[in-house]
């Protein structure tokens, strides 16, 4: 009888420890947060850039797309790099005019790509670095901007912060 009580107590303690570990892990990682923003230049916009954070991981939402602000212009190559401090977030390069590709329609080119990065937490003091280089109508343009994550506070998915980048010319 004492042996059964001892085994029952050991199993109960093991289960309580297991539950406590999951509870502590869930409390330390918090709930998922959604960040959403658009990047606008004078020639095009990148809309629906978003990511979710949970614990030490960042999951990139794959629904972002390019939208031309000048449909009569000719683009010749677009490069985009965004980072959270030193961790890459999005990277895109297109050698030709993305708005003339077969899968582009109505002045939009869907860039969507999903992925995840491991970063030990995203804090309000972190920065999103944006670098864009492209050619339009024979002119080369470069944009660069740093935006604090605190400016991109987590929002409902129906709203997004708009980041206007200015030329380095």
Image: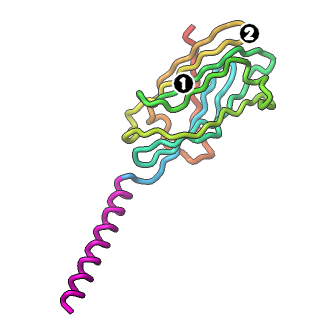
Q: Which residue is drawn at 59% across and 36% down?
A: 49
Query: Residue 21: which disc?
Result: none
Q: From the image, which quarter does the C terminus lie in?
A: top right
Q: Does the magenta stretch include residue 128?
A: no
| 1 or 2: mark nearer the eye | 1
Residue contact at pointers 1 and 2, CB within 8 angstroms: no
Q: Residue 110, located in which quarter of the rendered image?
A: top right
Q: Residue at x 40, y 32 (%)?
A: 126
In terms of secondary structure, where does tag 1 sit? strand
From the image, tell me which residue sits under label 2: 137
What is the basis of the colouring in this image? Answer: rainbow
From the image, tell me which residue sits under label 1: 81
Q: In this view, does 8 lie to the left or right of 41?
A: left
Pointer 1 local density, CA inside 10 Å: few below 14, some 14–19, many at least 20: some
Q: How many marks?
A: 2
Q: Is residue 58 left or right of residue 112?
A: left
In terms of secondary structure, where does tag 2 sit? loop
Residue 45: x and y in percent read 66, 27
Residue 28: x and y in percent read 34, 53
Q: Give the range drawn in magenta.
A: 1-28
Q: Does the magenta stretch include residue 12?
A: yes
Q: From the image, which quarter does the N terminus lie in?
A: bottom left
Q: Residue 6, located in which quarter of the rendered image?
A: bottom left
Residue 70: x and y in percent read 76, 20
Query: Counting residues from the N terminus, which is met first, the one under dot 1 or under dot 2?
Result: 1
């Amino acid at each position: 009888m004492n042996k059964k009580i001892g085994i029952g107590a050991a199993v109960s303690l093991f289960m309580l420890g297991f539950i406590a570990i999951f509870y502590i892990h869930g409390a330390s990682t918090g709930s998922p947060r959604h960040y959403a923003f658009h990047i606008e230049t004078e020639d095009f916009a990148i809309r629906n850039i978003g990511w979710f954070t949970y614990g030490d991981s960042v999951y990139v939402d794959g629904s972002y797309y390019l939208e031309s602000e000048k449909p009569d212009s000719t683009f010749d190559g677009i490069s985009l790099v965004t980072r959270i401090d030193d961790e890459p977030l999005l990277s895109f390069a297109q050698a030709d005019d993305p708005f003339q590709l077969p899968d582009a329609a109505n002045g939009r080119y869907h860039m969507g790509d999903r992925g995840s990065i491991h970063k030990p937490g995203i804090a309000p003091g972190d920065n999103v670095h944006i670098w864009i280089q492209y050619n339009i109508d024979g002119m080369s343009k470069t944009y660069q901007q740093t935006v604090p994550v605190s400016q991109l506070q987590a929002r409902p998915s129906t709203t997004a912060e708009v980041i206007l980048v200015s030329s380095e010319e």
